[in-house]
Image: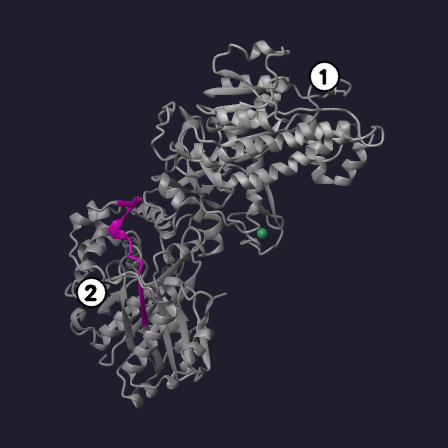
Amino acid sequence: MIDPIEPPRRKNPLLRTRLPTSPPRPRSRTSHGFTRAAAEGRFMLQRCEACGAFAYPAREACPACLSAGLAFVDAPRRGTLLAETTARVPSDVYFRERAPWRIGLVRMDCGPTMVAHLHADCAEGAPVLMSFQLDKSGQAVAFARPEGETPNMADDRQWREMTADPKFRRVLVTNGRSVIGQEAAAALKAAGAKTVFVGVAEPWRPFAGEKLLRGQEGIEVVTLDAADEKSAADLAADIGGKVDILVNTTEHVRPGGLLDRRGTSIARDEIDQAYLGFINLAQAFGPAMRMRGADGINNSVAWINILSVYALANWPAFGAYSASQAACLSLSQCLRAELRPGGVKVMNLFTGPVDTEWFQTVPPPKVAPRAVAQAIVSGLRGGLEEMYVGDVAEEIRQRLAANPKALERELDR
Amino acid sequence: MTNSKRTPYDGVVIAAPVTIPYVRYSIESAQWWIGRALSALVAQAGIKASDIDGLCVSSFTMGTDSGIGLTQHFGLCVRWLDTIPLGGASAIAALRKAARAVQAHDADIVACVAGDTNHVDSFRLTLENFSRFNQDAVYPYGAGGANASFALIARNYMRTFGVTREDVGRIAVAQRANALRNPHALMKTPLTIEQYLAARPISDPIHLFDCVMPCAGAEAFLVMRDETAASLGLRAARLLSTIERHNAFADDPMQVRGGWAMDVGELYAMAGVKPDDLDIVQTYDDYPVITMMQFEDLGFCNKGEGAEFVRQHDLTIDGDFPHNTSGGQLSVGQAGAAGAYLGLVEGLRQVLGTAGPTQVKNAKLGLASGFGMINYDRGLASGAAIFAGPSR
Ligand SMILES: [Zn+2]
């Protein structure tokens, strides 16, 4: 059983900030099948298409029959912990700083034996549930936890290295004028965040939902217009050193594509808000987050973008908007690479049309803003990298994987 | 399919066991250490370098070199060449291959050499680049190479067979006693069982004195036919038997036995001797618990009786079961791939009567074993050889 983590104390400015280091990063190309699984919170192993045997570590041929047909498939998570050890003086710098570190050997019910990081409540001889998690190097690692719930389970020291749990952390939600921003603030606060800063442009101007933010314990309205470089920089100068999680809820939805619009002013506006706003936020808050990736209980851990699933495939009815979202998706991959040395995760949460005024003419199913907020929290708790919220987003994901051309034709309706 | 009967090693002998004394850190390259070993081989055998017509090399730290680069580097013109990357099993594998080469007259004199340097960061670099499975599925867990992997094996073995740290410690303590008689051992102070038990934990249940100290050094020997040795006036040991096995018992969920257990009957049958006949035994001691496993798998006792065997025997030079007489890797140091050679080379000196301060009286018949390559969750390579001195 583990003790709950203590709220972090006020930081002593004279003490050195622990600098981020990465656990070992090199992997074979095939092994990135696990990276994909971890990014989406799935547990996948290679399974032989010829004889059905599961294999691990990643292989190029089946050790039971030498078939090359090894597909990554969702696999049963259950196993038994055969043996454990606590490494006290690892040679790797990342682990040496975090020693003692506990790992074990797990025999999976489906066959393979896996070396795994262990949750503190895992016991030898007892069943465990396996998952793939993204570690601070951004690569997939196996993590074993007890089969049932245990007290303060999410507070496990090694588990917390793999995840971005909002508990005791400070969050910036970038747009408090949107319903998603307001729901996200409330959900993150309820999930144990110490402070949720909520950015609002021209906060003296009243806005709908204002009372959900004002005067709420632990929620602080701050001035932020992400599209304005100076506004982002000013806020970062003020709170940049205490943003552990940044939730980019910038929202600027306008219908229309190319030919039925005149000129570029609407497109320019879309780019200013979504794409350049993203750049402003990244330049203002990214460097400090990268620096503070190993800074104790409330280290910086994650950057979340709320993106339209049409970033993955253009929806002509909202064609220019889709393109601005695609640009943001591309930028998120750049940000992921640049924040990676700090161990800060970049998560993209893809949604279908949300139940807000700009998608008013779009028929259901639409995503409730509260569902987006809940997905933000569960994504952080699971340490995910890709999340699809709602039926539309999930369907687009599957159709894109099955046949991108079919999806493109069918979105043109 | 059953294995066919093997041809004996008639007429194959091993001569000129060479050790280049180890140092903790070296600014020299692996090639430098291998060069010193070749030079010492030539000097000890009283031959010219040009008499060597076969070469077999093992090293972790040669960089981009393999055996072929070394031929030009050292001015050797050979007609038989091999590079063996089998870690702790390299010496037995080299001996086996070289024996068949000289037996078939593919070569007359094969130099088997292993050498490694140890720069301040070379051990970590070796760990990082060990193998694909290690890179993908072990190194990212902070195992830092062998310690955590062996800790898992040791913990399971000790729990399964009721072995205590004190049982395992007897092996390390006896080897330290032996090492105190070896001027080249890096460990120069006595070790008591109390000190062993009080050592700091490295990766439970592995503690400090369960671990070898990485160092730089080289080991070598010559393999030839008996008539070649006679014509050179060289005293040599006869090769009686060998075994080698890789990825044995893959279905065991965790490693409690090595490949030796698969072939041990053949090892003694081919040599025409029994375990009791052996005068000295040199096991591969990267961790003492692995040595205990070898006592079982090499037929000195049954599986699960290793601890009792260790309690019943005195493993020191003057004891009833002289074992790892140089002090072994645990007390001499582990010079990379040369660690595979350490036991065999010391064993050869023993049966040739040239071991000096560590000499066991009347040692005539010896066994040396090898073990290596924790590719993922277990050591994959194992081997052993039995050899006899000229007086037997
Ligand atoms: Zn198969």
* Mark 1 closeness class: few <14, some 14–19, many ≥20 residues within 10 Å: few
Write down the residue under mark 2: B322
Q: Which residues fall within the magenta stretch? A: B201-219
Q: Quadrant of residue A392?
A: top right
Picture coordinates of residue B107, whole percent (x, y): 42, 83
Would residue B215 be counted in the magenta stretch? yes
User: Left or right: B327 with respect to B71?
Assistant: left
Picture coordinates of residue B156, whole percent (x, y): 34, 45
Identify the secondary structure beneath mark 1.
helix
A341 vs A384, nearest the viewer: A341
A50 vs B42, nearest the viewer: B42
Give the residue displayed 32% in from the left and 48% down from the top: B154
User: Left or right: A384 with respect to A85?
Assistant: right
Picture coordinates of residue A56, whole percent (x, y): 51, 48
Chain on which label 2 sits: B
**Contact check, label 2 and label 1, Cβ < 8 Å:** no
Write down the residue under mark 1: A357
Task: Kindly indicate whether the residues beneath marks 2 and 1 are on one polypeptide chain.
Answer: no
Chain on which label 1 sits: A
Would residue B340 be counted in the magenta stretch? no
Q: How far, Cα to Cα, is label 2 from label 1?
A: 87 Å
Picture coordinates of residue A304, whole percent (x, y): 57, 30
Q: Amino acid at mark 1?
A: Glu
Q: Amino acid at mark 2?
A: Pro
Q: Residue furthest bottom?
A: B231
Give the residue displayed 76% in from the left and 36% down from the top: A407
Q: How many marks?
A: 2
Q: Residue furthest right?
A: A260
Instruction: Tell me if residue B361 comes above or below residue B304 in the rendering.
Output: below
Q: Which corner quadrant holds the C terminus of chain B?
A: bottom left
* Mark 2 closeness class: few <14, some 14–19, many ≥20 residues within 10 Å: many
